[in-house]
Amino acid sequence: MKQLAVLAVAWLAAIATLAQDQPEYRLELGAGAGLVVYEGDFNGSLFKSPKPMGTLVAKYKPNPRMAWAALVGYGKLGGSSDKANTWYPSLIEHPVSFSSSVIDVSLRYEYNFWPFGTGREYYGARKMTPFIALGVGLSFANAETTQDGIQQKKSSGSLQMPIGIGVKYKLADRANLTVAWTMHFTGNDKLDGIADPYGIESTGLFKNTDCYSVLGATITYDLWEKCKTCHNDRE
């Protein structure tokens, strides 16, 4: 029994040592692409008329269970009143279509269900983990509407709140793949260039406002190695 106990202790010590032979990194930098879907007065579907969107991302990782992510995205939105399921009396005889470009700037907190890593830098870390995200940000839209052959351009900006879910996967020791679906709730009813098509003003930060969802993938690279000890020996 003593020999078994000694072997078990040695085995656990070996695992702990092997689990720390790779450095941890605090920072991720990368980019990605995906699809964005407008959801507002002229569309209530999560899958209708997806448009392309590109994203730049930087993440600060205080530990393997969480990350603070800063994202800047650029995408396109589009739609028309004649394809909407909602009936707007003022637009029956004069339908309107729109095309918008959207700049999304957000900061979000990501919580990993399991520690994320290769398992060699942090014991118990996994190469794949689901996560949830919540944040705040800004949305800027440049909308071009067409009605009765007349084009108009309108610009707007507002606060927004992204809420998302996703999966992270270790492609290599310092390369990461993230796939996420995020809903962006904005305080703006002008992403489509038309505010209050019923002619009734609404109050409330996110009441009767436009929003958009993003399904995207990003690839990031680890930087900024974390120091394992705070008192390195000096010769």
Image: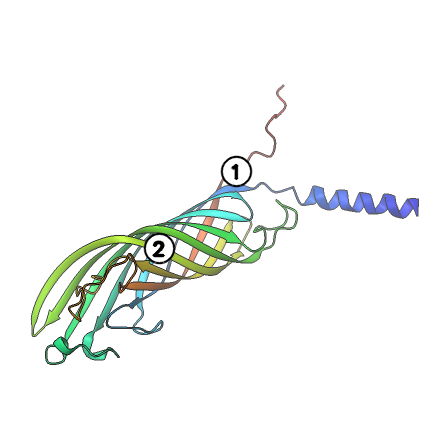
Q: Tell which of 68 and 136 is nearer to you.
A: 136
Structural distance between the alpha carbons of marks 1 and 2: 31 Å
* 1 or 2: mark nearer the eye: 2
Q: Dot 2: few (<14), some (14–19), or many (≥20) neighbours within 10 Å?
A: many
Residue 104: x, y in percent? 30, 54
Q: Secondary structure at mark 2?
A: strand
Which residue bears the numbered disc 2?
Answer: 161
Which residue bears the numbered disc 1?
Answer: 225
Relative horizontal placement of residue 186, taking residue 26 as reference (left or right): left
Query: Farthest residue toward the top?
Result: 235
- For badge 2, the amino acid type reads Met
Q: Dot 1: few (<14), some (14–19), or many (≥20) neighbours within 10 Å?
A: few
Name the quadrant of the C terminus: top right
Residue visible at 10% across and 77% down? Answer: 94
Residue 228: x, y in percent? 60, 34
Residue 55, above or below 46: above
Residue 173: x, y in percent? 56, 49
Q: Tell which of 172 and 43 is nearer to you.
A: 43
